[in-house]
């Protein structure tokens, strides 16, 4: 996941843009991004297909410590006669573990045009044909352990059991479930319907120039135990939980 600070005109405080897949490097990358900046109470704008469960949890807890506000969107810079002007387009995607990063916000806003999608944790290296693949007891232990960690995190962040129940009901051989406005409310992913509470005085006139690219197949990781910490060479159908090669499972 890449972090950048987007500045804007007067009467706009700017925001943090968070884009891409969460990997084992993401917590360290955010720590480096945070160095020398006072990010307390800043707004985090998410556009992500998810990533590592454990690293997303670590990021989410740090976001809550900073009192960040969260929303879903794509940062857009338009060239005008008055100079460059930044805005946020709500036509963006927040999927898999991104949904739990959204949950970390002290205040949370989801635009009507945003796509918030959930699914189960699974072994990513066997996601292409999940029904036919074989699984060991250790595989099941890893998934169940990460589900437990995710459940604790969800309740710590103020999320509801509805979010977990919905996420864990979507197997890898089915499409991701796009959450409806009522489901977002039941999950407590939305705390406000007013964009001004998370993006005060942001100019939205340039939003129409953004083109959100459909993500029919997403990169999704379940466990922070990816041996390389890098995104896969190709998108997978569901979450990935991998035991490090030549190492014991993380505690």
Image: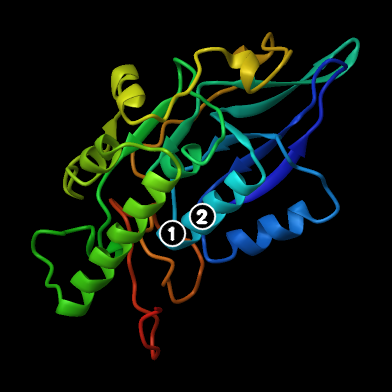
Question: Please, what secondary structure does the residue beneath circle 1 have?
Answer: loop
Give the residue drawn at x 17%, y 43%. 169
Give the residue drawn at x 31%, y 39%. 118
The x, y position of residue 156, in whole percent, is: 43, 47
Give the residue drawn at x 47%, y 55%. 57
Question: Please, what secondary structure does the residue beneath circle 2 have?
Answer: loop
Q: Residues within 10 Å of mark 1 (few under 14, many from 20)?
A: many
Seen as rendered, the residue at the extreme left is 132
The image quarter in which residue 206 lies = top right
Asked if residue 179 lies left or right of residue 204, the reply is left
The x, y position of residue 249, in whole percent, is: 36, 81
Given contact means CB atoms under 8 Å apart, are the residues at marks 1 and 2 in contact? yes
Q: Residues within 10 Å of mark 2 (few under 14, many from 20)?
A: many
Asked if residue 126 lies left or right of residue 84, the reply is left
- Label 1 belongs to which residue? 52
- Label 2 belongs to which residue? 22
The x, y position of residue 132, in whole percent, is: 8, 64
The image quarter in which residue 197 lies = top right
As drawn, 169 above or below 114: below
The image quarter in which residue 148 lies = bottom left
Q: From where the camera sits, is residue 14 visible? A: yes
């Amino acid at each position: 996941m890449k972090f950048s600070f987007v500045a804007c005109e007067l009467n706009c405080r700017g925001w943090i843009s968070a884009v891409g897949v969460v990997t084992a490097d993401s917590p360290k990358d955010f720590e480096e991004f945070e160095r020398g900046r006072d990010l307390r109470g800043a707004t985090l704008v998410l556009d992500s297909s998810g990533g590592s469960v454990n690293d997303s949890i670590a990021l989410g807890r740090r976001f809550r410590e900073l009192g960040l506000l969260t929303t879903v969107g794509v940062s857009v810079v338009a060239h005008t006669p008055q100079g460059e002007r930044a805005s946020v387009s709500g036509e963006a995607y927040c999927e898999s573990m991104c949904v739990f990063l959204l949950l970390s916000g002290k205040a949370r806003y989801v635009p009507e045009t945003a796509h918030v999608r959930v699914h189960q944790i699974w072994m990513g290296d066997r996601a292409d044909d999940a029904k036919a693949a074989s699984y060991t007891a250790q595989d099941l232990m890893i998934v169940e352990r990460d589900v437990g960690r995710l459940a604790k995190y969800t309740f710590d962040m103020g999320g509801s059991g509805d979010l977990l129940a919905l996420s864990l009901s979507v197997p890898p051989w089915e499409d991701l479930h796009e959450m409806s406005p009522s489901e977002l409310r039941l999950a407590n992913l939305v705390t406000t319907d007013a964009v001004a509470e998370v993006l005060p005085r942001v100019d939205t006139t340039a939003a129409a120039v953004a083109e959100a690219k459909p993500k029919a197949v997403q990169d999704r990781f379940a466990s922070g135990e990816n041996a390389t910490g890098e995104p896969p060479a190709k998108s997978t159908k569901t979450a990935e939980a991998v035991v490090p090669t030549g190492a014991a499972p993380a505690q």
